[in-house]
């Protein structure tokens, strides 16, 4: 007996299409490089927005940094700017 429904091809969880989150990777076996970089916009308790950045070697906890913004729009603009910079450096 099956307790869950069979997965439907093409359906993705809502978190996978969240526009406020971006996960990038840069892998180069020749240089022994396996890095990740994650960006997300999160609400704060005071109505502001926080841009949370986490990075490090794949498989480790890595480091993180939080930047606070007055509104979600400016945090999203910073997310897009950082994403473009990382993509120019080889992250996908």
Image (cartoon, helix red, strand yellow):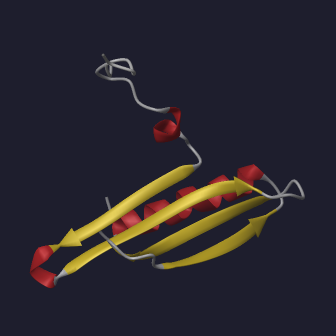
- Asked which quadrant contains residue 75, the reply is bottom right
Give the residue drawn at x 47%, y 61%.
83
Residue closer to the observer: 68 or 86: 68
- Asked which quadrant contains residue 41, the reply is bottom right
Left or right: where does residue 33 sit relative to residue 72? left
Left or right: where does residue 44 sit relative to residue 27? right
Give the residue drawn at x 28%, y 68%.
26
User: Where does residue 8 sit, x and y in percent of width and height?
Assistant: 32, 18
**Which image quarter holds the C terminus?**
bottom left
Total numbered badges shown on the rendered structure: 0
Left or right: where does residue 92 sit relative to residue 75? left
Residue closer to the observer: 47 or 83: 47
Q: In this view, does 63 lie above or below 26?
A: below
Give the residue drawn at x 76%, y 68%.
68
User: Where does residue 13 sit, x and y in percent of width and height?
Assistant: 46, 32
Residue closer to the observer: 79 or 10: 10
Give the residue drawn at x 66%, y 63%.
51
Residue farthest to the front, as pictured: 1
User: Where does residue 84 sit, x and y in percent of width and height?
Assistant: 45, 61
Residue farthest to the left, as pictured: 30
């Amino acid at each position: 007996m099956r307790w869950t429904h069979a997965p439907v091809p093409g359906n993705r969880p809502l978190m996978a299409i969240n526009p406020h989150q971006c996960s990038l990777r840069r892998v180069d076996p020749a240089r022994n490089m396996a890095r990740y970089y994650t960006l997300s916009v999160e609400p704060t308790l005071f109505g502001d927005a926080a841009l949370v950045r986490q990075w490090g070697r794949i498989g480790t906890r890595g480091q993180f940094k939080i930047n606070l913004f007055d509104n979600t729009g400016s945090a999203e603009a910073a997310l897009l700017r950082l994403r473009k910079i990382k993509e120019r450096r080889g992250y996908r």
